[in-house]
């Protein structure tokens, strides 16, 4: 999809052919996250800010991996025990190990996944998210969480998901990239209100409460890199779930949410809050 000049065409399942600048001169959260996960889709500004974060939080790479593991555990639970067959993954990130459709379709081959991200580099790699197995389907929408109504009415979404049936919405490590003044709670609420009873939402969010000094240093570094980053308290994160019924064990440090195998010695070692809730 790239034309060799760093410009690229929107594509996958939509017909808009506007050129998009990848802006490899400024750090992007998707590419920083890719850097922490050991990926290769990142550029010097992403690595520089990624390293600045790592100076403040030496365990940042472990945190990224633990966040990713949560996504796997949550999706496995939803596709398995909870019987969910449709997923809406917003803030998808650059494809890596254990993408939502791979996890869901390994449990239930007919799972359908719609991915949404606003970063052109994720769009550039979105074909890697299109390798559905069996009777399942995946689709990708280049869109912004700040415009949830557009996501919900996108023809690609409407062709892929049946909103009259339960959906597993994942907002994993994305809400912290939306400033308070842009009201991420209201944006999430629009999405959640549109989903059928029996739907689920899975959320992770960096927490202030684990190490406020380290978080303050990271927020300062992000500001210098012109990136919005808002760690939030457990109470602020819990508000995202609204009146949906929280699954056990509630809003907890990400390593403590239904760990595979032995519980971790220190579940607070990764500074993310996490939870999964069900619409009544
Ligand atoms: C830290 S990555 C998380 C990736 C994946 N959800 C995970 O947890 O492994 C955050 C992703 O959210 C995307 N993102 C940031 N702000 C967004 C917005 N307003 N709308 C849609 N996607 C957004 C970024 O481009 C990036 O790919």
Image (tube, rainbow, N blue to C red):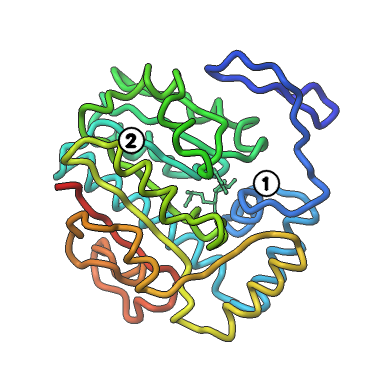
- Residue 139 vs 47, above or below: the answer is above
Q: Can residue 233 be seen from the camera position used here?
A: yes
Q: Which residue is located at x 74 percent, y 25 percent?
A: 8
Q: Which residue is located at x 24 percent, y 70 percent?
A: 262
| Label 1 neighbour load within 10 Å: few <14, some 14-19, many 20+ | few
Q: Which residue is located at x 37 percent, y 30 percent?
A: 113
Quarter of the figure with residue 197? top left
Q: Can residue 96 be seen from the camera position used here?
A: no
| Label 2 neighbour load within 10 Å: few <14, some 14-19, many 20+ | many
Locate residue 57 relative to residue 75 in the image: left or right: right
Circle number at residue 40: 1
> Within 8 Å: ligand 1 and the Cβ of disc 2?
no
For the image, the number of numbered tags is 2
Split into 4 quadrants, where in the image is the N terminus? top right
Locate residue 36 relative to residue 279 in the image: left or right: right
Q: Judging from the image, what secondary structure is the residue with disc 1 in?
A: loop
Circle number at residue 87: 2
- In percent of width and height, residue 157 lies at 41, 24
Circle number at residue 91: none
Could you tell me how far apart the alpha carbons at marks 2 and 1 are, in whole angstroms? Answer: 27 Å
- Residue 198 vs 247, above or below: the answer is above
Q: Which residue is located at x 41 percent, y 30 percent?
A: 152
Q: Earlier in the sequence, mark 2 or mark 1?
A: 1
Quarter of the figure with residue 59? bottom right
Quarter of the figure with residue 117? top right
Locate residue 195 relative to residue 131 in the image: left or right: left
Locate residue 252 relative to residue 278 in the image: left or right: right
- Residue 175 vs 262, above or below: the answer is above
- In percent of width and height, residue 159 lies at 37, 16
- In percent of width and height, residue 126 lies at 56, 30
């Amino acid at each position: 999809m790239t034309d060799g000049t760093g410009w690229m065409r929107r594509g996958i399942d939509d017909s808009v052919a506007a050129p998009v600048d990848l802006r490899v001169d400024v750090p992007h959260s998707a590419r920083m996250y890719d850097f922490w996960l050991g990926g290769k889709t990142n550029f010097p500004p992403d690595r520089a800010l990624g390293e600045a974060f790592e100076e403040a939080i030496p365990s940042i790479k472990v945190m990224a991996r633990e966040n990713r593991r949560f996504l796997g555990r949550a999706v496995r639970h939803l596709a398995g025990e909870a019987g969910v067959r449709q997923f809406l993954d917003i803030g998808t990130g650059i494809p890596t190990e254990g993408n939502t459709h791979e996890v869901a379709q390994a449990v239930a081959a007919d799972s359908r996944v719609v991915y949404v991200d606003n970063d052109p580099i994720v769009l550039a790699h979105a074909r890697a998210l299109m390798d559905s197995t069996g009777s399942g389907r995946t689709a990708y929408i280049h869109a912004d969480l700040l415009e949830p109504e557009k996501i919900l009415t996108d023809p690609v979404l409407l062709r892929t998901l049946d909103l009259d049936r339960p959906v597993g919405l994942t907002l994993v490590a994305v809400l912290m990239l939306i400033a308070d003044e842009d009201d991420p709670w209201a944006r999430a609420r629009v999405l959640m209100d549109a989903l059928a009873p029996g739907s689920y939402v899975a959320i992770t969010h960096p927490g202030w409460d684990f190490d406020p000094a380290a978080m303050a240093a990271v927020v300062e570094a992000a500001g210098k890199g012109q990136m919005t980053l808002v760690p939030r308290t457990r109470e602020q994160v819990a508000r995202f779930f609204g009146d949906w019924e929280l699954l056990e064990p509630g809003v907890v440090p990400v390593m403590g949410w239904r760990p595979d195998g032995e519980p971790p010695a220190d579940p607070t070692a990764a500074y993310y809050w996490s939870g999964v809730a069900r619409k009544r």
